[in-house]
Image (cartoon, helix red, strand yellow):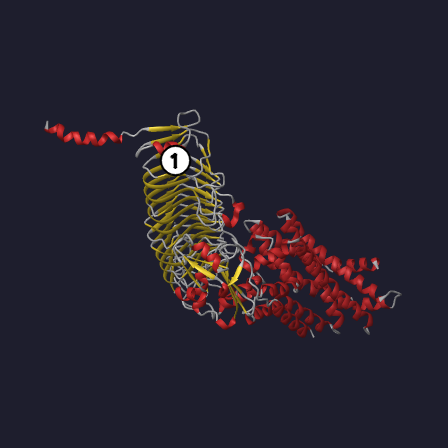
Amino acid sequence: MLKLSKYVLYDIVRSKIILAYTLFLFLVSFSLFNMEENSSKAIMSLLTIILIVVPMISMIFTTIHYYNSYEFIELMLSQPMSRRKILLSEYAGVSVSLLSSFLIGVGIPILVYSPDAIGFSFLFTGGALTLVFTSLAFLTSVIARDKARGIGFALLLWFYFALIYDGLILLILFTFSDYPLEKLTLVLTALNPIDLGRISIMLKMDVSALMGYTGALYKDFFGSGSGILFTVGIMFLWIILPLWGALRIFKKKDL
Amino acid sequence: MKTAMITALISLLVFASCSTQVEPFKYGTDICYNCKMGIIDPKFGGELVTKKGKNYKFDDVGCMVRYLKSGLLEQKDIAQTAVINFEKQNDFINVNKAIFAASDAIRSPMNFNAAAFSSKDAADKFLADKPGKELNWNELYNKIE
Amino acid sequence: MLRLILILPTIIYCIPTFAKTIVVGKNQSITTIRKAVEIAKNKDSILVLPGIYKEGNIVINKSLTLAGQNFPILDGENKYEIFTVSGSDITIKGFQFQNSGSSAMNDYASVKVIDAKNIFVENNKVINAYFGIHFSNSSYVTIRNNTITGSPAMEQTTGNGIHLWKCNHALIENNRISGHRDGIYFEFVTESMIRNNYSTKNIRYGIHFMFSHYNSYFDNTFNDNGAGVAVMYSHNVTMERNTFEQNWGASSYGILLKDISDSRIQHNSFLKNSVGIHMEGSSRIEISQNIFKENGWAIKVQASCDDNNFYQNNFYGNSFEISTNGTMMLNKFYNNYWDKYEGYDRNKDGIGDVPYHPVSMYSMIVEENPNALILLRSFMVSLLDKAEKAIPSLTPENLIDDKPMLKPNKL
């Protein structure tokens, strides 16, 4: 299994796309840290970019990779290896390469300019988002039959988490504005990994004061030990559940 | 399936969080809904809770009366109308059970100068050595313009 | 002879005014301030030598000058109000007041002045008091160079640093106030001036005006209070050259204006406040030549405000510039500098040719439904703002600066 992962990883690195991605992240973060007058402002701008780019690239790259290695996967299936192992090695290969891209591209600038609690939680969030959306992409790829549909599906899902979900929250907030919604918004935002990542970082920064009463409530919650555990737990579920679903479907699937 | 689940979840949360209890004041953090002043004097204040579970906090019973009179909130939507006991911080008394002492010896945050007590005895005792008079909720409500 | 007759009354009149100085100290014939006050006559001075005096409550109702040498300590033992003053022409200077008592019903203070005139309270230190210096029903009072330090541990049971009720012609300058409820509190105070004070870490406001007209405050610094200054139910208040910084928190402001009219806010700096100015029910206020930098909201103007003018202000790096909860706007904005302005200037007169809309779509949403703040900095919010900028539809169309400056105003 390890051998297979290694092979997948080698294959990905050779394609150079991942190198371009690393370089892109590196240049963006480096220039933001140089442009903005203080590191917290840079982190704020970087956050906006990362929250869009990381999920999108993770999903699209994973989907394309999956369909491109379709023949390879079929070949592997003819070998005495369980389907579970094959898919997991693919997952390991893709996620390790994307994760290291992120950790190198964004991690190095952060270690240089902002090696503090905010910086580390930023790296955690970015890393978790990479893994979450890689998992999700595996799920959609396994479900969809052809490449075009798979990419479309992946993009739609990305669009949903990055944009539509927040629109729905806004809709709910306005529809039920007569009710006390502080706790509801807390739960709803926690159910979207992108929102969860954004809020858990923002609450560590000065900007959280702008979030007013709701923000204060959030801060009480996310600032506590159980809040941190909760964030990590939800992210973990978002990684495990789609992957588990993908495995189940892949096992039964007629390839 | 997913939509159904989300809908179920939302309705559950909305109605679960629908408690109509008064919420204790967080002094130094909460602000008065009417005058926007920070709530800090533990002897005064009031709170409205709507039937849908929203809380409105006030730093002075006068601010609460003014807000009620503004008509922004309809009487039929209100589940609780409570005032702070002058003698005990964060102890809420239903307005209809409260006895108010109106006296110029009292300096309330918004200058309405009325204090709420849980019993007539307490108000009597308080007013024993001060000018002023006792009012019930309706009298106080009508007195404040 | 005639001359003598003329002079004589003057001499006679003068004799009793030869003021004497009574010295109070451990090794003096008089060891307590109470005794000194008792035997003193009008216009006498009392000099208090260094030491610790625990005398409970001392009532002063003669025209005296009480001066401390090297800050003698007057301790209220957490039970007593230390000085209770009334009368006229009284000076209290050079003392250290500490541990004056607190009471739920009485506003105990270190120095309480009632029904008085021509009072000076200067160069004192007040430590751990309920109310620091408390004046009521007085006129022509000066409170100068005092340091008033409360103990923030007491939270909601602390009183105000300097508290004035029904006073007029007060001058409050060069004081340093921290750890109280409101740094300086005015209720029914008129024609008074507050200048050069430093107010920090007070639980509620740096200065608080209630029903107080014709007052001015300038050159003060308000740093890290619950909120900077609250001006409520007053008119003709002048606010100039003050610095409001770091009033940062969920319900914090630089200035809170509520039912204010005919006032001026000029040449102030607002740095890093959650909200620079929050105004409600305010009319005829001139807000000009101020700097708003890196605030959450520079100015929140509620729909209940009218006839206010905002001009020649400079706005830099504020998350929200102007926000409002109404669609009608009865206030004027002109010649301000907005760092987010992207227009052009073809005739090179320094004024942009395209009007500037300082209200963003998201700020309108948040005003309507504060819970929506949870979407701050999300992708959807930035898209919404971009869309609204391209096709304005929800933001008030007459809330515009039609003469925005291309370069910051020189202040």
In the rendered structure, the answer to whether residue A154 lies left or right of residue C407 reads right
Considering the numbered disc 1 on the image, is that residue within a helix, a strand or a loop?
A: strand
In the rendered structure, the answer to whether residue A132 lies left or right of residue C246 reads right
Q: Position of residue C197 (x, y in %)?
A: 41, 43
Tag 1 subunit: C
Q: Nearer the viewer, residue C289 or C90?
A: C90
Q: Is residue C80 above or below residue B73?
A: above
The residue drawn where x is 71% and y is 73% is: A149
| Type of amino acid at the residue the image marks with label 1 | Lys
Q: Which residue is mark 1?
A: C93
Give the quadrant of residue C38: top left
Q: Position of residue C215 (x, y in %)?
A: 34, 50
The residue drawn where x is 58% and y is 70% is: A172
In the rendered structure, the answer to whether residue A229 lies left or right of residue B121 reads right
Q: Residues within 10 Å of mark 1 (few under 14, many from 20)?
A: many
Q: Quadrant of the N terminus of chain C?
A: top left
Residue C168: in sight, yes or no? Answer: yes
Residue C326: in sight, yes or no? Answer: no
Q: Nearer the viewer, residue B84 or B19?
A: B84
Q: Nearer the viewer, residue A9 or A156?
A: A156
Q: Nearer the viewer, residue B123 or A142?
A: B123
The residue drawn where x is 69% and y is 71% is: A153
Q: Position of residue B140 (x, y in %)?
A: 42, 64
Q: Position of residue A16 (x, y in %)?
A: 72, 59
Q: Residue furthest right?
A: A80
In the rendered structure, the answer to whether residue A75 lies left or right of residue C123 reads right
Give the quadrant of residue C170: top left
